[in-house]
Amino acid sequence: MARLASLDGMVETLETRVRGRGVPFLGICVGMQLMATRGEEHGGHCGLDWLPGRVVALSARDRGIKVPHMGWNEIEVRRPDHPVAGRIAAGAHVYFVHGFGFEPDDEEVVLARAEYGGHISAVVGRGNMLGTQFHPEKSQCVGLGFIKDFLSWRP
């Protein structure tokens, strides 16, 4: 967030275009995490606060769980009515690389999730804003389809 704020006018422009004008926004991995209220990576930091919640470290409580989480996981679409996230097929697998995850204040923003030592918010969104914890650009056909659907989305 500090890096984003260091770019003169960037946060203000994002606020104006995304929140003010409703331009579709897709945050991928750290981009999704910046949409949260607060993040705890490398200390506590404020986010954009577009989706209330916080970004916290993944826990390796389960001995079979490695952190960072790197690899393919099945995701469960929780909002099949969403025009982008809802088009992900049941049983689809996507690629993750992360050590922190988004914990929303309101579970309604979680459009899809994965299991990795507990629930992981895989796709979040509200209005014209979407975020993915997984990397669609590394998720082969599923990810390319997601990006294609986002690009044609008119919220």
Image (cartoon, rainbow, N blue to C red):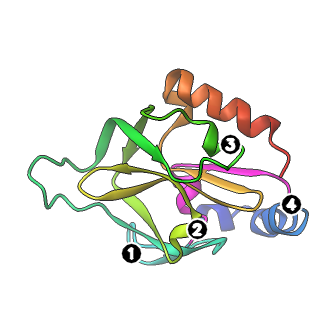
- CA separation, marks 3 and 1? 33 Å
Residue 43 coordinates in the image, percent (x, y): 38, 75
N-terminal-most mark, 3 or 1:
1
Q: Is residue 132 visible?
A: yes
Dot 2: element: helix
Residue 77 coordinates in the image, percent (x, y): 51, 47
- CA separation, marks 4 and 2? 24 Å
- The magenta-colored residue range is 22-36
As shown in the figure, which amino acid type bears the numbered disc 4? Gly
N-terminal-most mark, 4 or 2:
2
As shown in the figure, which amino acid type bears the numbered disc 2? Ala
* In this picture, residue 154 sits left or right of residue 108: right
Dot 3: element: loop
Residue tagged 2: 2
**How crowded is the residue under tag 2: few (<14 C-alpha within 10 Å), some, or many (20+)?**
few
Dot 1: element: loop
Q: Are marks 4 and 2 in contact (CB under 8 Å)?
A: no
Question: Residue at position x 85%, y 46% from top?
Answer: 154
Residue 9 coordinates in the image, percent (x, y): 81, 66
N-terminal-most mark, 2 or 1:
2
The numbered dot on residue 144 is none
N-terminal-most mark, 4 or 3:
4
**Residue 108: quarter of image:** bottom right
Of residues 39 and 110, the one drawn nearer to the viewer in this rendering: 110
The numbered dot on residue 22 is 4
| Residue 17 vertical placement versus 123 (above, below) | below
User: Is 140 covered by the magenta stretch?
Assistant: no
N-terminal-most mark, 2 or 3:
2
Q: Are marks 4 and 1 in contact (CB under 8 Å)?
A: no
The numbered dot on residue 84 is 3
